[in-house]
């Protein structure tokens, strides 16, 4: 038998390529860790996926590549639908992470919801082939951009505090994320402090009068020492518990660390003032009791609050499970559907007007009882005494078309159907981007639409550092008034 000729193995690619949020409906953060053979400490890679509307390249996705895999801590940013090239050392880590985290396929007979159909289940990362395009070097993600990212999704990030996924506390090691995390902790602490009630705790101490149960073994010591007090065990009603001692101490740390942030300092001082009946224990004492307290706290929200408080006191990078320094892989991945962020921003903008009131996901009316159920995102009611329904809005996280007739066909049919179903004007709400973006409405009568008006409204998308749609109440009222003009006279 002739020997098989030697065949050179196919060389491994030097770069592995991934697309961020393939459908363009997902922002978030991915943190990877790897252990290099030539160094003792692990390496960390933070990759932020930012809104596509923050891209400076005129809306077109770009290709970026990380060229320096040797740094101990690297933070980079891409935008939705950008393509990122990672060196094989990092690319293999992310590839393994997305394979493990792949969404399960729907079972037979299971229909996707409207949100899933719209891309809410869009995965944060998808491996792609070499784009064969010129790649720009991946620059550092500056703190201002990271801070703007966390401000934009602060409400959606509350889940990281209430039900933190594994590795969520890595955020405490990123200055921009840390500020948001501390703010969320103080807000949650303020809510829980307002509902705080005294608790019965088991107490053992010497008293001059008998209370509760006498400790027999201490009576022998009392007789030998000829002391007056007797040791008693009893239940004492108090608000000064170990749980709240940890929260108060953490609030004091927040105040000392974030003193330059006036809003955060005010939150910390408010929590501290409400806990003025709680003893101030040393950090060492609080942490020594942490495991015992965590086991005793049963309410989920209080347990999470205590968990975060002790993490802040430890000044640790990791909050959830301690990380193995020799491990490689995904430490943390967090994704927010940007369409949900946009929907919330639109509703909040309407509520700032005073003349209108927004209700998200109104009950009662929907298209298609079976299959992909379609329901309007926002119902807008007039302010004041009558509170009548004025119009409905359906958020679309995509670039605004030139007019309703230029919108996607399915979006046109959908908004016409909403106008007929609700009997009021219906608008598609699109984000505008760039410094020239402004609030405006473009209304057009819909053919065979029973006389109801349909159209689009364009609102500016927040830029980095902005928490809300940058439009005045007067501008928004003018847009909404124009959208429903003549509807009252029908």
Image (spheres, grey):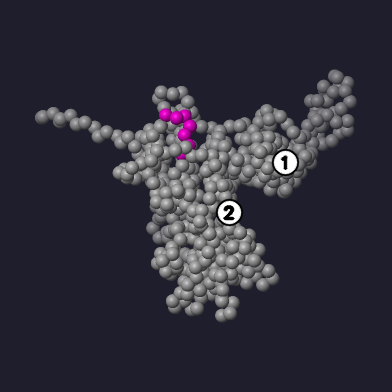
- In space, the residues marked 2 and 1 are separated at their CA atoms by 26 Å
In this rendering, the answer to whether 241 lies above or below 438 is above
Q: Locate residue 54, reporting x and y percent.
A: 48, 49
Given residues 83 and 419, the one toward you in this image is: 83
Given residues 35 and 456, the one toward you in this image is: 456
Residue 71 lies in the magenta stretch: yes
Tell me whether the residue at label 2 lies in contact with that at label 1, contact meaning CB atoms closer than 8 angstroms.
no
Range shown magenta? 70-76
Q: Locate residue 19, reporting x and y percent.
A: 39, 46
Residue holding disc 2: 468
Locate residue 470 relative to residue 35 in the image: left or right: right
Count the marks.
2
Which label sits on residue 173?
Answer: none
In this rendering, the answer to whether 144 lies above or below 36 is below
Residue in view at x 82 percent, y 22 percent: 221
* Mark found first going from the N terminus, 2 or 1: 1
Dot 1, crowdedness within 10 Å: few (<14), some or many (≥20)? some
Q: Quadrant of residue 14?
A: top left
Residue holding disc 1: 269
Given residues 342 and 422, the one toward you in this image is: 342
Secondary structure under the numbered disc 2 in the rendered image:
loop
Secondary structure under the numbered disc 1 in the rendered image:
helix
Which residue appears farthest toward the top when viewing the image? 224
Residue in view at x 50 percent, y 56 percent: 436
Q: Locate residue 347, reporting x and y percent.
A: 58, 60
Residue 413 lies in the magenta stretch: no
């Amino acid at each position: 038998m002739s020997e098989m000729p030697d065949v050179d193995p196919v060389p491994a690619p030097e770069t592995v390529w991934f697309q961020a949020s393939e459908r363009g409906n997902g922002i978030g953060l991915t943190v990877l860790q790897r252990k290099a053979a030539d160094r003792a400490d692990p390496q960390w890679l933070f990759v932020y996926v930012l809104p596509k509307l923050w891209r400076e390249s005129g809306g077109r996705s770009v290709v970026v590549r990380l060229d320096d895999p040797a740094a101990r801590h690297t933070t980079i940013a891409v935008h939705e639908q950008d393509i990122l090239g990672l060196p094989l050392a990092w690319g293999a880590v992310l590839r393994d992470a997305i394979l493990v985290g792949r969404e399960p396929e729907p079972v037979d007979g299971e229909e996707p919801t409207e949100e899933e159909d719209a891309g809410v289940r869009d995965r944060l990362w998808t491996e792609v082939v070499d784009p064969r395009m010129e790649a720009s070097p991946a620059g550092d993600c500056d703190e201002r951009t990271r801070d703007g990212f966390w401000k934009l999704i602060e409400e959606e990030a509350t889940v990281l505090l209430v039900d933190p996924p594994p590795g969520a506390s890595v955020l405490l090691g990123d200055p921009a994320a840390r500020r948001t995390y501390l703010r969320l902790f103080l807000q949650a602490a303020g809510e829980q402090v307002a509902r705080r009630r005294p608790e019965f705790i088991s107490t053992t101490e010497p008293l001059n009068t008998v209370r509760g149960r006498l400790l027999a073994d201490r009576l022998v010591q009392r007789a030998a020492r000829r002391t007056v007090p007797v040791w008693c065990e009893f239940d004492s009603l108090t608000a000064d518990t170990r749980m709240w001692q940890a929260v108060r101490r953490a609030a004091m740390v927040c105040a000392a660390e974030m003193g330059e942030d006036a809003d955060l300092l005010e939150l910390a001082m408010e929590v501290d003032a409400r806990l003025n009946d709680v003893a101030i224990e040393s950090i060492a004492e609080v942490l020594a009791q942490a495991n015992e307290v965590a086991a005793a706290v049963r309410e989920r929200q209080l347990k999470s609050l205590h968990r975060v408080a002790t993490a802040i006191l430890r000044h640790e990078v990791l909050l959830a499970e301690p990380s193995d320094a020799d491990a490689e892989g995904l430490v943390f991945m967090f994704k927010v559907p940007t369409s949900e962020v946009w929907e919330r921003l639109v509703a909040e903008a309407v509520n700032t007007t005073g003349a209108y009131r927004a209700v998200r996901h109104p009950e009662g009316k929907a298209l298609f009882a079976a299959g992909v159920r379609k329901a309007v995102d926002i119902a807008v009611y007039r302010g004041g005494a009558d509170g009548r329904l004025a119009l409905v809005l359906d958020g679309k996280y995509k670039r605004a078309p030139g007019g309703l007739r230029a919108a996607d066909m399915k979006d046109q049919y959908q908004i016409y159907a909403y106008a007929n179903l609700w009997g009021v004007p219906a608008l598609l709400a699109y984000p505008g981007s760039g410094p020239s973006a402004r609030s405006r409405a473009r209304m057009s009568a819909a053919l065979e639409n029973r006389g109801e008006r349909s159209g689009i409204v364009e609102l500016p998308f927040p830029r980095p550092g902005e928490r809300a749609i940058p439009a005045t109440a007067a501008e928004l009222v003018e847009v909404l008034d124009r959208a429903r003009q003549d509807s009252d006279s029908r």
